[in-house]
Amino acid sequence: MIYFIKKALKKILPANLLAFYHYLWALFSACFYGFPGQSKDFIIIGVTGTSGKSTTVDFITRILEEDGKRVASFSSVRFKIGKEEWENKYKMTMPGRWVVQNFLKKARRADCRYVVIEVTSEGVKQFRHKFIKFDALVFTNLSPEHIESHGGFENYREAKLKLFRENPQAVHIINVADENAEFFWRLPARKKIGFKLKNQKLKCPLNNYPLIEAEPLNLINLEFEIGGQKFVLAAMGQFNIMNALASVAVAFNYGIKLEICSQALAKAKSIPGRMEVLIREPFMVVVDYAHTPQQLESVYQSLTSFLSEGKMICVLGSCGGGRDKWKRPVLGEIASRYCEKAIITNEDPYDEDPLEIINQVAQGAGEKAERILDRRQAIKRALALAQKGDVVVITGKGAEPWMCVANGKKIPWDDREIVKEELKEKKIKI
């Protein structure tokens, strides 16, 4: 019932009235919990961008903890207060205002000094970031996403910029190699810190602000150097070097030594559903959340380094509910370039026809596409095709615990558990 009421309100209410509705909820929730986000006891760090937010939040949290700080954090993957952590089952990266404010109150009660928050454009659009005083903000990168929801890429970017514009008292930590870096860099801030790889070009003038650079040493084992300190990541994916670099830039701002950062990141494995390797032999199986063209290509590029004579077999789909329809054939085309077989399947159709979504993705994949509506059967098919030395990569859902279908229903789901069950049937040890 609530689902249908919300859906009706979105259609009936004018945009300005809907925005006022969201703002009121933000105000009421902050009042109810005593404005915990305004507390002087907290140092709150926000992380935003298109890709890498959850991993960057995790890396920052690990570094702060390694330095002896008591930390709370939340992302699309998990909530954490001190040593207690639990899964984010809301299927929302940045949950509603009441959840956010309640989390902050609990973090304050637990005597956490630092709070690290993943902030989304939808969260900003619906004022979930309001009444939170950010001490530092991190911009990871920007590429097209949520285009229909925001009404264009410029509006999507503006939602991200709004977070920085409304917090000029914060330290702005920017990926200065991103094509959109200058939009963020030119906003007023208490202090600015740039970060990039040494082989990347600057996209904005630094004007004597500090720059943290990483020099990649080994892109397979993810070894790199910052300021003479060597780093080795246990996590997979070349893009994780940038996520690690963002976290080191945050540490630099708070006076944490590079040695501490290196120690923390050496222990940081991939977080659930992000380049998560389920088995390595006789073939590799990887589950990842990638659901944008840039993310998908980064995942495939990283995994090609593990192929010698084997092939890549991919399972993918695309989200429904009118979300970013433009990207569906693009995802299929990317899959066709990297994968021997692209198995197109159901993901989160919401109220759209899942077969129509599958056909739109398959259109881009061409002859390499194989359409299988049942996601379990699609995964089973990929595992059946895999031979020794191959890589099976399953993208789109990562560690999400639900599949969202028509009429607001959620079906319990976990790609990783499905893989484990199917491997057990094949008598392959995990």
Image (spheres, rainbow, N blue to C red):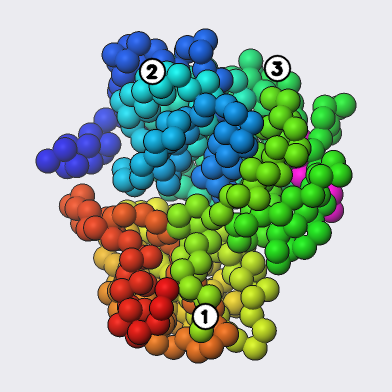
Q: How far is disc 1 from disc 2 in space, using C-alphas? A: 46 Å
In this rendering, position of residue 311 left or right of residue 367: right
How far across and down, in percent of the image, does residue 263 sit? Answer: 68, 44
Q: Out of 35 and 330, give the one closest to the viewer.
A: 35
Whether residue 101 can be seen here: no
Q: Nearer the viewer, residue 313 or 65?
A: 65
Single out the mark in the foreground, 1 or 3: 1
Residue drawn 60% across the image and 20% down it: 135
The numbered mark at residue 190 is 3
Magenta segment includes 161: no
Residue type (three-letter) at the residue carrying disc 2: Arg
**Residue 252 seen from this side:** yes
Q: Does the magenta stretch include residue 196?
A: yes
Q: Earlier in the sequence, mark 1 or mark 3?
A: 3
- Determine the secondary structure under disc 2: helix
- Asked if marks 1 and 2 touch (Cβ < 8 Å), the reply is no
* Mark 3: amino acid: Arg
Quadrant where the C terminus sits is bottom left
The location of residue 351, given as percent across then percent down, is 24, 56
Closer-to-camera residue (146/287): 287
- The magenta span reads 194-200
Q: Name the residue under label 2.
A: 109
Q: Quick one: label 3 or label 2, which is nearer the N terminus? A: 2
Tell me, yes or no, whether the two marked residues, 1 and 3, touch with CB atoms within 8 Å.
no
Inspect the image, locate mark 1, and give the three-letter code of the amino acid beneath it.
Glu
Which label was assigned to residue 281? 1
Query: Secondary structure beneath disc 1?
Result: loop
* Mark 3 surroundings: few (<14), some (14-19) or many (≥20) residues within 10 A: few
